[in-house]
Amino acid sequence: MIDPAWLNPLIAFAVGIVLSFNLRKVFARVQSRRGPLLWMPAAWQDINHSKLLQPLYDIVKLFSKQTLIPHTSTALFIWGPVLALICALSVTLFVPVAGNAFDYSFSLVVIFYLLIFVTLFVIMGGISSASLFAAMGGVREVELMLANEIPFILGTFALAITYNTLSVRDMMGFNLLVNPLAAIAVFIAILVKLHVKPFDIPEAESEIVGGLTTEYSGKLLGVLETVKLVMLFTLSAMFVDLFLWVPSAGLMSWAIFILAILLVSGAIGLTNALFARFRIDQATKWLFKVSTLISLLAIGWAFVGPYVLSYVGGVI
Amino acid sequence: MEIRPEEVSDRVSGLLEKGARMIYASGVDMGVQGIKVDYYFCFDRATPSQHTILRTYLDRENPVVKSVTPITDQADWSERELIEFLGVKVQGHPNPTHLWLPLNWDDMYLGGQPEGDHETERINAAPPATTPRENIVTLPVTSIPYGPYHPAFIESNFLKMSVEDEVVRKADLKLGFNHRSVIKLMERRDYYKDIFLAERICGFCNAHHALTFAHAVEGITSIEAPKKARLARTLLCEMERIQSHLLAVGLIGDLTGFRTMLMHSLRVREEMQDSLEVVSGQRVTHGLITLGGIRRDITPTQADFILNKLKIMKKSVPEFFDQALSNDVLIDRLKNVGVLSLENGVKLGAVGPTARGSGLRIDVRKNSPYDAYEDVDWDIVTENGCDSLARMKVKMREVLMSMHIAEQCLEKIKVAPQELAMKVTELPCGEAIARSEPPRGELLYHVASNGTNTPDFVRIRVPTFLTAHIMLRLIQGGWVGDVPAIIGSIDPCFSCTDRVTIVKNNRKSVVDMRALGGRQ
């Protein structure tokens, strides 16, 4: 029988659309806007339909448009987004969706590498367009990545230390209580990876227009948007698996998974709405100071926590 | 005060030592008399309501004047305007580059011949054969273009910065993409039509443009608007200030990536837009002000409606400001960014919220009061931070102050005598200047009448003319990421700046508009 984990990429795309909708909706409601509508009265049906699939419509629209390729660009301009999409889709195979995934004793490391590759391919594609704005966006992206990978890896490794494994499935659980500091560190890292405010510096439209995606149009931009959707799903799912998972099976596990992932994307949307954008130097400083400190404390807690807890339990 | 061209430098430096601030320098082609150049000064910080105009006539065949820009930077853009539009040879100007006209302007119109046949000649739209004069737009540096269309600007203009490791080394601005020769159009229309034309110069400070033009004409005819009209004009100006500042504050948020702040400022601002709609029937241009008064009455019912709206805003606006100012990331982005010290502010001739953010106590409403500003209780708002944050705070507190003024005006309007406008019976030969304080700074109109139904000439100095010049100084040396924050805090209005400049020469102005629409 075929492993159900092969369906993960499809699920990632489908649920990613819902997550993107959720993010937009939360963003709009905080701004006292209406946002994309989930349901419309019958009288409006001939004007417009439900906007649940709006993120999908946006991508479909992009795929139906002409792709302009700047004459200064190299072959990587085309291959960058495609390779990024391949990497993004292959990460989903290793991230458990309601418990279904390819799981090895080292799958956490595979996820790290693939996630980094997604970012790198987007950067490569962007800067090969020879656009000035893309170059600046690329520099900013690299700076952010350097500052961000450490807390991300440390935060997840805190769990790996607690459970003494590198397999994601083995460390799944409601670890928000086991190591809340790690949850905070990983959540901040996810914000940076998704370019959520205050960390949307690489694509700050009032400073560098579109950042890395400035020169992209049509189908290639559609591919990049798909990568974004899949990344949104993958990182949210990873947070759910690592910190919000309640062990269960069958339909119950799907219900819990969907609920938790909507919660995470809602939290991401809320953060997106509540902050202004950091300047690049402020962001890297902040990440090195606060985020890295939190993740180091999480590692410390992973080592010391069990002894403290058993000591406290013994006293009680 | 009329002086000879050679004396200009000495007289200007003498006035500046006495504490004068140079507002503007403008030229008018007077035909036989030569090119008339006016230098406008005011003594804001020392004596209120005192103005000095130095006037000199240049030879029409060989207009040469010594530059005063080395003495004061306040004259920089004014003299560049003289160079471009009147062909005045300003000797010793440190940076005589094109500001409004296209870079290949010489090629385009003259086709290499200094006196070509301008009537039949088509514009040479080919790329410039020779590299245009030295300008950052054509300099071989790693530079970031902001514009002509860029998300950080609402209007079209071209800011180019040479950068080194995300730090801006040099910045230059190119204007003129939306140039409309409004002043030339004004000279062809009668006074009543000019009011509506003035109103269309800018979307935000349109009531101030109309008001200042009306003031200038009223100055020529020596009439004064009745009490109700003066109150209504004050009210309209303050309501306009509220809506403009609220949007400007929201835009600072948007430019620093805080979209939520923009959305909420728009939500809060909507009450004011409703009130403006009640007063004038329109949300953008109002058409309320006319020569000698106002065109429509503000009834007690309307006044009550606006008072009610103001009551709502008195609650929602401070709440919105508190929420915005409690956002640490936003404060970090604005604090110590684009610092304009008090000395520099005085030296560069800062006006409006830009000056008041540096602790400079100047405000035309107080310094040379017009309309009903002497009858209401208010004070100049200043902040001492000198940075973008201080400029934003000035705008925020001015909104609250404006609501206070508007409330007093409304209470007085309800009981004011019914007379709306004085009749303008005759318009003698003469000229007058009028100043007012739009949301962005100081606005100057100079209108001259020759006894006919159209003005002899009109000259306009808009606030952005000075503040955009200061903005360039502030951008240099800062981070690329700070540029939007600085632009937002200065809040330049290029639609004002672009439209007010003129081409005096008829032949040129015709092709000018066509060419600028399609080029670059």
Image (tube, coloured by chain):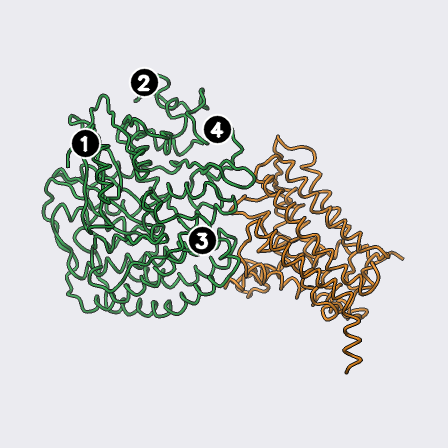
Chain colours: A orange, B green
At 48% from the left edge and 28% from the top edge, which residue is drawn?
B139
The image shows residue B23 at horizontal and vertical percentages of 26, 42
> Residue at label 4?
B139
> Residue at label 3?
B251
Q: Chain of mark 4?
A: B
The image shows residue B180 at horizontal and vertical percentages of 33, 37
The alpha-carbon separation of the residues under discs 1 and 4 comes to 36 Å
Q: Amino acid at mark 3?
A: Leu
Per the image, label 1 sits on a secondary structure element best described as strand
The N terminus of chain A: image quadrant: bottom right
Which one is earlier in the sequence, the residue at label 1 or at label 4?
1
Between residue A40 and residue A214, name the one nearer to us: A214
The alpha-carbon separation of the residues under discs 2 and 4 comes to 26 Å
> Residue at label 2?
B114
At 34% from the left edge and 46% from the top edge, which residue is drawn?
B343
Please check whether the numbered discs 3 and 2 fall on a single chain. yes
Which one is earlier in the sequence, the residue at label 3 or at label 1?
1
Between residue A41 and residue B190, name the one nearer to us: B190
The C terminus of chain A: image quadrant: bottom right
The image shows residue A193 at horizontal and vertical percentages of 66, 53
Q: Amino acid at mark 1?
A: Thr
Q: Amino acid at mark 4?
A: Leu
User: Is residue B173 rendered to the left or right of residue B16?
Assistant: right
At 51% from the left edge and 44% from the top edge, which residue is drawn?
B479
User: Is residue A103 rendered to the left or right of residue B69?
Assistant: right
Residue B240 quadrant: bottom left
Per the image, label 4 sits on a secondary structure element best described as loop
> Residue at label 1?
B56
Q: Chain of mark 2?
A: B
User: Is residue A220 rendered to the left or right of residue B120?
Assistant: right
Which one is earlier in the sequence, the residue at label 1 or at label 2?
1
